[in-house]
Amino acid sequence: MTTHRTYRIGQIVPSSNTTMETEIPALLHAREAIAPERFTFHSSRMRMKQVTQEELIAMDVESDRCALELSDAEVDVMGYACLVAIMSQGPGYHRKSQRRLHDVTQGNGFPTPIVSSAGALVQGLETLGARRVAIITPYMKPLTRLVVDYIEAENIEIVDSISLEIADNLEVGRRDPLALVDIVKRLDYRDADAVVLSACVQMPSLAAIQPVEDAIGLPVVSAATCTTHQMLKALNLRPQVPDAGRLLQGS
């Protein structure tokens, strides 16, 4: 009887995050319907309740501890699941963060590939060849501006953005993902190559990804789909998940 490997997926998440521990498993379990690999899921948490720059900076300091804890479990890949915590610290910070967290795991005797949702979003857009994008965020406008500046520093132009201006992270996680089907109608994506339906790991969007992509005829991604794409690449697995948008079609 042939057995197939089970991969351990680690996530570093804000303490108030309720979405990445549902959407990442949902995506990878959907992949199990078309591929033999199996996955288990393991998390470590950093304290954060309000999505403010001050709390985000304080939270990021805890990521080293989380990486150390997850490397004790010898996870096969580790995702830093807070996009704005990275992007609020200045252009290119995901590279510095990923190197530092990898060094932590290496020092613990189990060097682990590190993916950040911030870096994954940039890499996902680059994979699609998207140089002009429109985005939706739940953030207050000043934080959205930091996200726009971060992405544009990676030579990707933001042609339009919508800020839902929700500071409470739990409230963000309670949103109906299908509300994005209507919200995207207010987004000016006429000159865009792709749409980022949720530039936030906490704002649920998975149920809306494929319907919106089918409706507007452009590639549609989220922080979660891009993070899943980069995790699968780090594991040397085909980045294919059914009904999750063009990025995860496996090509």
Image (cartoon, rainbow, N blue to C red):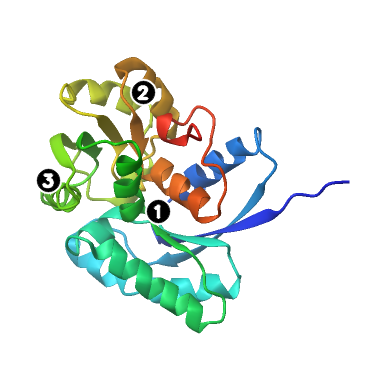
- Local crowd at mark 3 within 10 Å, few (<14), some, or many (≥20)? some
Q: Residue at x 26, y 71 (%)?
A: 58
Judged from the image, the secondary structure of the residue bearing numbered disc 1 is loop
Residue at image mark 3:
141
Please determine whether, in this image, residue 22 is positioned above or below residue 247: below
State the image coordinates of residue 149 (x, y, percent, origin top left): 13, 51
Residue 116 or residue 24, whichever sits in front: 116
State the image coordinates of residue 190 (x, y, percent, origin top left): 16, 21
Amino acid type, callout 1: Asn
State the image coordinates of residue 193 (x, y, percent, origin top left): 24, 29
Mark sitting earlier along the chain (3/2): 3
Horizontal relation, residue 126 to residue 115: left or right: left
Q: Residue at x 89, y 46 (%)?
A: 1
Mark sitting earlier along the chain (1/2): 1
Toward the top, the furthest residue is 215
- The total of numbered circles placed on residues is 3
Alpha carbon of mark 3 to alpha carbon of mark 1: how far?
A: 20 Å
Please determine whether, in this image, residue 3 is positioned above or below residue 104: above
Alpha carbon of mark 3 to alpha carbon of mark 2: how far?
A: 25 Å
Of the two numbered discs 3 and 2 in the rendering, the one whose residue sits closer to the viewer: 2
Return the mark for residue 213.
2
Residue at image mark 1:
17
Please determine whether, in this image, residue 125 is positioned above or below residue 213: below
State the image coordinates of residue 247 (x, y, percent, origin top left): 41, 35
Amino acid type, callout 3: Lys
Q: Are marks 3 and 1 in contact (CB under 8 Å)?
A: no
Judged from the image, the secondary structure of the residue bearing numbered disc 3 is helix
